[in-house]
Amino acid sequence: MRKTFIAIVAVLLLALMVSPIIAQEARWDGADDLPVNPLACPVEEGAEAEEAAEEEMMDMPEYNGGQPDMAPDLAGQPIVLVDVPKLIGIGYFDATHLGMQQAAEELGNVTVIQGGTTEANIDDQVADIENYIAGGQVNGILFAANDPVAISPVLTRALEAGLHVVGYDANSQPEAREWFVNQAEFNGIGKAMIDSLAAEKGPDASFGIVTSTFTTPNQARWIAEMWAYASNCYPEMTWLETLEAQEDSVLSFNQANTLINKYGDELDGIFGMTSVATPSSADAVTQAGLCGEVAVVGLATPNAMKPYVNDGCVQSVVLWNPIDLGYASVYITRAIVDGEFAPGDTSVMAGRLVNCKL
Amino acid sequence: MTASMTSAKPVSARFSPIVLLPLLLALAVFIAFQFLPFVNQPELGATTIPVLTESRSNNEVGVPTNGLILIPIASGVLLLLGIWNLSNVQMIRATSAITVLVGVLVLEYFVIFAMDYSGEQSTYLGSMGIGFWALLILAFLMIVQVFLPRAAADREFQLRSLISNQESAIAIALVVLILVIGTSNPRFVSTNNILDVLQGNAYIAVAAIGMSMVIITGNIDISVGSLIGLLAIISGRLVVSGAPVWVAWLAPLFIGAAIGALIGVLVAYLRVPAIVVTLGMFSILKGVLIIWTNGQRVTDMPPDFYLAQMRPLGISMPIWFMIILTILAAIWMRYSGLGRALYAVGGNAEAARLSGISQQRVVLQVFMINGFFAGIASVLYATQLNIIQATPPPALELAIITSAVVGGVSILGGKGTVIGAMLAAILLNAIRSGMIFINVSPFWIQAVQGILILVTVLIDLLRRRRQAV
Amino acid sequence: MAAINESTQQPVQQRNLSKRLQDMILSQEGILFIILVITIIILSNSNANFLTSQNLFNQGRLLAEVGLIALPMTFIIITGGIDLSVGSILGLSAILVGYTWNNLGLPLEAAIVVALLVSCVAGFLNGLIIVRVNVPPLIMTLATLAFYRGLAQGISEARSVTGYPEWFFGLGQGTILGIPTQLVILGIAIIISGIVLARTTFGRTLYAIGNNMVGARYSGLPVERVTLAIYTFSGLMAGISGVIFVSRFTTTRSDMGSGLELDAIAAVVLGGTSIFGGKGSIIGTVIGLVMIQLLRNGMAINNITSDATIVVIGSVLIFAILVNNLIQRLRTAE
């Protein structure tokens, strides 16, 4: 018996030694090979910039959402919406929910209840939405999807049950929802990130990326866009490595430290792709005493980055207003129910955000 | 005339003050090392003893920016071992220890005279030579031997007994890993990285101390991850709302112990299986945390709150906590009544009861201790970064249990030590870091980690079966 | 004489019957069933949509995956073991369906068979090392938890596979005679498992192993073969659940099924199976499953946020076992 046992151990050790060899493949650029659409590079002359900006005003794409089946006509009547974020218990979705509550107060005839589960798990999220469909007490669902494809069947069922479905932050497949409120296009975020790093460290910087997981759809698309944009506009930039750190701040810290130790002077910048990774990377850079030598650029919330910006370690943060995101989605849903916003429209009144243009 | 069973005297169960002498000696060696004028490092100002250095960058004066710091520590501890064994009339062991010590010291001076540092973060791996590393490993194993529970009648010193325990296996695995990866990518063994590897999982190692004790008694605690998350937020909120820093540091310890007591009562006195109670508490604590914080992270802590960022003697605080707490816990488990009762309860609860050990009280106390250590871990976790996140780290309890289990603590109860758990926590972090350094494809990192855990577990079993045979 | 016998016989029979009834009600399963009924009454009172067949069938659909995994988990826990790797095997099976269909070009039916085969092998590997090398199941399955999940991530390279043919979705989203497909599969599995556990030698062997493994071995029972079988069975069920997952979500992700093992263990333990082995039943597991699922469903329908829900479920778990312990102790004290 010992022989087979030793054989098992030997095979495993062999696999271990061999695996780094076969595992060293091309660097990941993930995102399921979905198409990337990098924006134009920044230009020097002003005139050229105007031209470029005009060219970017494309034709309005066709409406590609789904529509609810026999939604009850509740124009002007009180409605109940449920907010189903990726997960509850993190500041970002707390802020979006706050925006929704603000909109509900202003409108007066909307109630927003908090849905969502405690883990960013697509199975749990789908089960949660099923519960709300079955409960029959909500008129609309506001969602931020953990996976665009996996969430679509249940959203389609919601539409068939006559519920309104509006997404924010993380989209589903288009036909499973009526509208999607986007904080920024993927390529816009990619451009903002790479431009920030280039501004701080020059067009030949080398950077590493700390993200949550490789399978988080938004992060994956952003990284793919960043890579496409950088290849186009900053061919001298070197992409060193991408590391996963889940949503664990200490793990992000450790991964950022490993990046710093592995590349030493070669590392010019670290991108943080989540509001957990960016402050942790900034902490790693600060505690290693490399403020200013290693730039930290990323997506984060302002409060989290305040101490680093004050220290001068972080010079720019890419962010959007999550409160407005939630706010807008409630207003849009109200407009849909009141019949003021239909497929084919190109702008809608959304409270303090005045005119939301598509 | 009864013939004695062995020729050795049983190990003395009391500390003699003479043990302090080698510690002082080690400290003296270390301080002297700072002043050695023949060290050819221009940046190493020979007149400063670093206390709380703030920066770790290559150019600042601090602890010697290379691994030589290990040498005086190693020699010091070896001296301790030698004196200890001398006091136990273990002549063979003492001679071996002192021989190793002399060898290490000789190599140390050889290295200092022969090397020429360029001041950059170079590896000391190749320059030190295999001999030095072999001796250092041997020395380390012998150190570990001191803290292992031994049978009352001690055995002759045998080389085989050095590697006949899981702690040594983990230590060897760790050193092998460092050697292999360090040879492939020398940046892996730069001081900064080694210190990062030691520090990264330090809070997990501290929590694993408590978890090891729980597992030794035959129970388990799946709720410790949520508990750490909750206690960290409590600590942060206390200090942000104006409580003094030391209150914020100590409160999680006692709250953790209180929650541990609750679990202990349910397990010990109300006879609910530990896995059930902690499975339930896992959800309860997580839910309470989210309800209470509403997802708000805690920021803006005052600067003296950051315990984990302090660096006495240039080594970050979590590493000190990890090593000192592990050694203290190991000594406590070996020599104190409650510590030995843990092994008794885990090994054979009925026999323990007949020996007068109250199994219920022991289980209650071990869960309180577990909560206490979870509190310490949560303070280290909370003070590491400028922010405390509201959600507990995912799969933290899995990491802690894996550390304890891979470190040799037997789930069947009754065996294992906390030193193995600490080494396993360091090993897990070294694996994570090492995989990145040798460019394993990021998709396969987790699989490789899984294989390594599997291999370590199998080696442990192989060793145990060989012993049983 | 005869008169006395006759008159004493009837009360004996009645006593047997009432004693049996009392035993049934006061067993863990019985108590849990009563708690379940109370819960259903409370929840259906607070929301009319709770007890509709549409809702209940939907809940059945959702609990099918955990249910399929909880059945072999019952067997394993009865023998005193545990299997933490089922969630990872589920993820691996889901990934393999996508990978072999998409990257290797196999027809979808073959891809499913390959995924199920690999899941069986994964479970078999667990069992093999547990049996041959005597690794405690907790440790072994903890290690394979990490390893199989890592395999899933490595093989998939973090890409999802979508675009399956329509007929495949019938498995996870369709119905047979009005009942969701996976619920039918679960129902069949429950019946088979229940019969095996309660009425066959195999089932009795499981109890024997759980009560006293050494004794069982010396009694000539095929302990090793049985253990191998149940771990392989566990792998197979995880594989089937993985295929159902893919069909339900129309995509594959390498993180599917993470955390599912804890849900399954909670259901099994809630249903009266002792974690130390030797006691348990399929009925109990089913009641435990239904209880947890309906609790979650009921609370969500009543607009209770999920952070409060998990507190409730955790408390119910502890409370139910506590109450049962007390009642059992009172019973044996009589």
Image (cartoon, coloured by chain):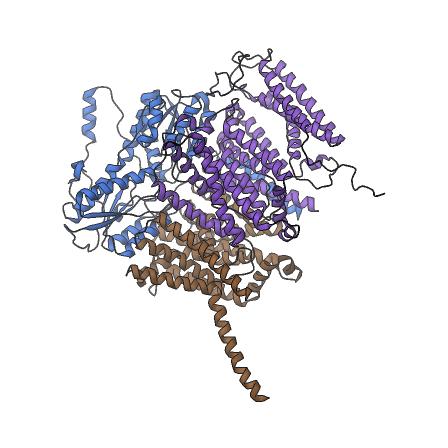
Badge count? 0
In front of the other: B280 or C232: B280
Residue B36 in the figure: left or right of residue B54: right
Position of B342 relative to A230 (above/below): below
Query: Which quadrant would the N terminus of chain B be assigned to in this image?
Result: top right
Q: Nearer the viewer, residue B443 or B213?
A: B213
Q: Which chain is depicted blue?
A: A
User: How far from the left and from the top, in percent, is residue A271?
Assistant: 37, 29
Looking at the image, which residue is at 47% across and 50% down? B279
Residue B19 visible in the snapshot: yes
The answer to which quarter of the image holds residue B34 is top right
The residue at the far right in this view is B1
Residue A299 in view, yes or no: no
Residue occupying the point 34% across, 61% down: C42
Q: Which chain is brown?
A: C
The image shows residue B407, relative to residue A280, as above or below, that is below
* Towards the viewer: B14 or A266: B14
The residue lying at 14 percent from left, 45 percent from top is A340
> In x, y percent, where is residue C3?
56, 88
* Residue B97 point in image, percent of width and height: 70, 28
Q: Chain B is drawn in which colour?
A: purple
Task: Give the left or right position of residue B407, taking residue A164 as reference.
Answer: right
Q: In which quarter of the image is residue C209?
A: bottom right
